Amino acid sequence: MVITPARQQYLQLKAEQPDAILLFRMGDFYEMFDEDAHTAARVLGITLTSREFGRGGRVPMAGIPYHALNGYLRRFLRAGYRLAICEQLSEPGKRLVERGITRVLSPGTIDDPALLDAGRLNLLLSIVTHGALVGLAWVDVSTGACEYRALPADDSVGLAAFIDQLDPAEIVGPESDDLEIDTRVAIRPITGEWTVDSATRLLTSRFPGCEPIRPAGALAVAVLISYLEHGQPDLLKALEAPLPYQTDGIMVLDRQTRLNLEIDLRSRDRHDLFGLLNRTHTAPGARRLRTLLDRPLLDRNALGRRLDAIEELVGDTPLRSGLAKALSGLLDLERLAARIATGAARASELLALAETLEGAERVRDVLDGRAETALLVELTADIDALPAIRSRIRAELDNGSSRLLRTGIDRRLDLIYAAIDRDRDGIAAMERSERERTGIRTLKVGYNKVFGYYLEITRAHRDKAPDDYIRKQTLTNAERFVTPALKEAESRILANEERAAELEAELYARLVRELGDSVATIRTTAAALATIDALVALATVAVEQRFARPVLDDSTVLHIEGGRHPIVERQLPYGEFVPNDTRLSDDAPVVILTGPNMAGKSTWLRQVALIVFLAQVGSFVPADRARIGLVDRIFTRIGAHDDLANGRSTFMVEMLETATILHHATERSLVVLDEIGRGTSTEDGVAIAGAVVEHLIERVGARTLFATHFRELAEIAADNERVAALQTAIEQRPDGLVFLHAIVPGIAEAAFGLEIARLAGLPTAVIQRAQTSFGKTTRAIPTVAAKTTSAADVVRERIADDVLAVDLANTTPLAALNLLAEWQQRLRAATEEPIGPRALLVAEDQRAAQAD
Amino acid sequence: MAIRVLPPPLVQRIAAGEVITQPRAAVRELIDNALDAGSTRVEVEIAAGGYNLIVVHDNGHGIAADDGDLLFARHATSKLASADGLDAVTTLGFRGEALASLATIGEVEISTRHSNEQVGFRITSGGARSPIARQAGTTVTVRQLFSRYPVRREAATPVTEARAIRRVLTHLALIHPEIGWVLRIDGRVALLTTGGGLRDVIATLEGDRSRHLLEVGPLEVDGACIRGLADGPNPASGRGDGIVLSVNGRLCDVPEIRRAIARAYADVLPRQRTPRVILTIEVDPARVDANVHPAKERVAIRDVAAITGPLVDELRAMLGRTAHSVSGQRSLALDLGRLTGMGVAEDRSPYHADGWQTRDIPAGSLPALRVVGQIADTLIVCESEIGTLLIDQHRAHERVIYERLLAGESVEADEPARIAIPPRLVSALEACAIDAQQAGWRWSEFGLDDVLVTATPPEMDPGDLPDVLAQLATEPKHDIAAATACHAALRKRRPLSPTTAVALVKALTQTQTPATCPHGQPIILNLDRDFLERQFGWR
């Protein structure tokens, strides 16, 4: 087999980036070969074919058209692949086209706005083990913001939870490490040698003013830098000095709790807290809001500053709506700043920068002299609308003509353009001069993309063409020619255009470089705008959803009046969400809540946790009034879910989660338990749940909300004055149960399991069987069962009356048949469609679906 | 008071036949109920102007479960027991017709819970009823209003209705500032107040532009109490909602009081200019007849003169208390500027007729005219038998050129001209290539950035092509002929010689459609007799 030059070129380029899929530009397609072709066919769903490189050298191939590149890139990146894009660097001719890798992309190293999700951080994470520690460093290359942290290596659960919270798009780690961490994105092993010494040296040279970083963190940052250097060294120019991840003053919230409370499901289709609060007008604002939700605070002063600002925005409608108007339409200043730092910014991006800085000025004008609270005043001062930069961009970039830079910026460039103009005019003028010279009145000059400029003579005059005319193309009724003079002018134009392009690129690069001096200021302005946007969003939601400012203090009190679940409330029709109070204090920090399924237990538990969470984000809360002693951590154990992937049963998951709570909860924590001990036998369940509650009361003293079916647990409350027993209010009526969704003192009488099973449409035979056999051993069901005269029974009775009322002597067989048909129909309808309670059930289903 | 059916004689006394003719009326009736229930918050949501959906949600005392079955019965109300009651209505609703009427013209669902009861209920106009858990208060949902009355549905477009409903809510928010109001139109919050003083609410609704309003009252007179906010003698701008009145909490018009306000402002404001006045009037219910208008939009107050006299005095005193800074020089030109949307008054040369002799132009598509002069270097003034005409010189010229272009006039260039086309205009160039022939342009492709222009419309230069394309790019709905005409036409703020003006007007009278420019904008404003009479108040 002969290796053709093209194949050889491919293999060489592939060797430069062996772990990337190589997209090899051939004409109008990007082709992938060998293993890459198989991968592409699988991931992108494109056809796998093959191509012959010389005799016998057939290899698998798959290709994508050049104009659809971005769409396919997005799919590759979402699937986690690293990509190298190879372009043709010379014009196609007789010889082999020169090719080279122009871009390397991976999920965590995207800076092209076209490939990014505007409202989300896109993080590249590195993980390095160093003794008993694991160093983590992460960067969003689209903004350049970088942070690092070290965690103990033996806490793989904690590590996994933290990584999950970061939600990185890509993870890299030294090949030599073999960490067993459960991450959603596989760790990409990279080769290299990193020592603490070399890492520290690298960091001090790159970030001279930066505080010294401890070994684990330094190694992680060094790995991050090596990875970027290997593929996209330009991105490093935007890299900001790494900052230690702030854990002081930040409330920890584990992954399961975030999911249980539906804080940020990172999904467009599902309702979550982020979706409710995201009334931001800019992409950086949306990202800032996400960060606020990611990092609830423990510091009362910091929270007070946020709440003050929001209170001012809530109270001053003209200020709030003025800011909303000024913010809308602003572009992503954070990412623009990074594009300028890396030098990748296109002219359109610079013009966008100028426009957005003008917008920043409008935002400042709205705030200036009006905003009074400390945080807003500080943010206002942070905005620098950089008028000099704006006018420089506007002065140099030509936003209208075919030229990149305006006339008058550079004399050499103007001269080249003048020469191009002269030559083009010269060619245009040839129409007249050549007509005169040849005497052919129909002679025309023209241009087409393949042959360039030409002179065209109709067929009739073909013989009059002078000797210096060189034939280029024959059409049906015309001939096209070039002359030496025309050719000369054309090649001068081409050469000048090339010179102009080079010079322009140079001048443009200089402009971008000089703008780079202002990147730090732009970033400060961008950060201020993002925070303002997030605060305005929180204030807007507070006004529209009637949130109230919580009172925060250092007590362990939790008093909520008229608390609501903000997401469930939005899903229900007007007025149908029933608000509830919550009162936990030092004396009675524990609540045991009993009540049947679907009566609103879970909603209440989550709503209390969400209100505390929102308060510590610094937001107003969905309640009439709230006083909250700051919480150091919110623990939740809600719902049943197996972890089949790890071979854990529902019960095992329950117990693991409960163990975490018992180990980590303090007297400042908020613990929310929804049903524990359900995944095992009733006896064991009650025993375990009882012991857990006792431990929480006696040893931990955390504010605890415990919902359970086990009546026995609620009876603990009777014996312990530190526990309050609450139940969900239910009204029993002749036509069924009504769940009032009100939380009231007391212990629920019954679980109403059978009633609910019946409402849910369990076959009547099963229900009856349950009532007769199981009912003997279980309390409370008979009282309910006795009252359940179903709609079907009523219909049956009425039909019986009708049958008796028929006068058989005066009924024809046909009429009798019709009557029979009608009765049959009524009976069917009655058994299939229980009336009354069914409607309730539907509403309940929705509520339950929300809550789960 | 429980709901009961009104005795027949009372039924006959009640004026209205058909109560609800438009969604806005339904919204008003339902809001009246919400206010009668002592609500402190009222939320309204509409979709498609209320034709598809109206929700009125309140936090009032709700409806007792025992009253549920009579909700949709006609002339059933909890608010009026006998004919005596009608003489002193203290509630906004009283006829017992709103829900009954709504139930006949749409699908109504009521979800409610009385504050004294634990369980609420939901009932539909179809008769289904079920118990539910909910907050105290009432939510009325009306779907498919007028779906069986297609004529009514066409009476007003959803947009018009939405605007009207928003106006009603705005006025209600002003006369009941203590209540929190929310209006959602097609899912978006269109109005939101949180309850407070009138000044807070007006700042929320209108921002700083209503800051200058002055306090009126409280004025106690003849058993009535009047208070509110009103314009000073020098109102900020013509915009605003005019006079908003309420009597005993009902948003309504009292023509006598409206006239009294006009009287008070007569010598401070230009005539025909309505002042901004928001007044709430509390008066003995026995003196009020709210039943004079089917939609309760107007009320009559017995012995109203006893109130209006002191009100005029109070307003005059208030106006006198503030510095009287009204300028007597509100020129007609300024108002015209507002009327036509052109900042004419900003111009330095408002009028010149030096050297102009009146010139007659015979009738064409316009009546016979006499050109008199030019205003603001922008408008040509003409007299005619139908009135004084102001002609926008730019648009007039545009029309003239446009019709010539459509006639197919084209001028061959002596020599093809090479014109560079900026890349952003290439798509405009390609899009209009076919129309261009029609409009007198001819060009061929010439190199990457260039075209070779071989023919142009009359009076155009090949070099105008990029500008025409740029113009075209900003108004994709129009064709290249319109863009060319616009570019070629005389600009605003150009002084014209009398000869030019006359030639232009003459040409305009020769066009087919002299009244509208190719972009569909008016060319001529006619200050006819009627207009002048209205503006000067001669009538």
Image (spheres, rainbow, N blue to C red):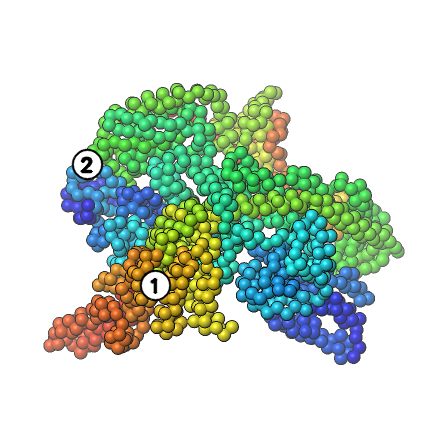
Snapshot quadrant of residue B496: top right
Q: Which residue is drawn at 61% across and 59% down?
A: A150
User: Above or below — where is B220 with respect to B456?
Assistant: above
Along the viewing direction, whichever of A419 and B401 lies nearer the viewer = A419
Q: Tell me the element at label 2.
A: loop
User: Above or below — where is B153 with respect to B397?
Assistant: below
Along the viewing direction, whichever of B117 and A504 lies nearer the viewer = B117
Residue at mark 2: chain:
B
Q: How many labels does the image show?
A: 2
The image position of residue B86, as x and y in percent, is 19, 39
Q: Tell me the element at label 1.
A: loop
Q: Which residue is drawn at 56% across and 23% down?
A: B351
Q: Residue furthest left?
A: A809
Along the viewing direction, whichever of B386 and A311 lies nearer the viewer = A311
Q: Residue at x 46, y 69 (%)?
A: A653
Along the viewing direction, whichever of B188 and B275 lies nearer the viewer = B188
Do callouts 1 and 2 point to residues on the same chain? no
Residue occupied by mark 2: B87
Amino acid of disc 1: Met
The image position of residue A335, as x and y in percent, is 63, 51
Quadrant location, the N terminus of chain A:
bottom right
Residue occupied by mark 1: A598
Amino acid of disc 2: Asp
Residue at mark 1: chain:
A
The image position of residue B371, as x and y in percent, is 56, 26
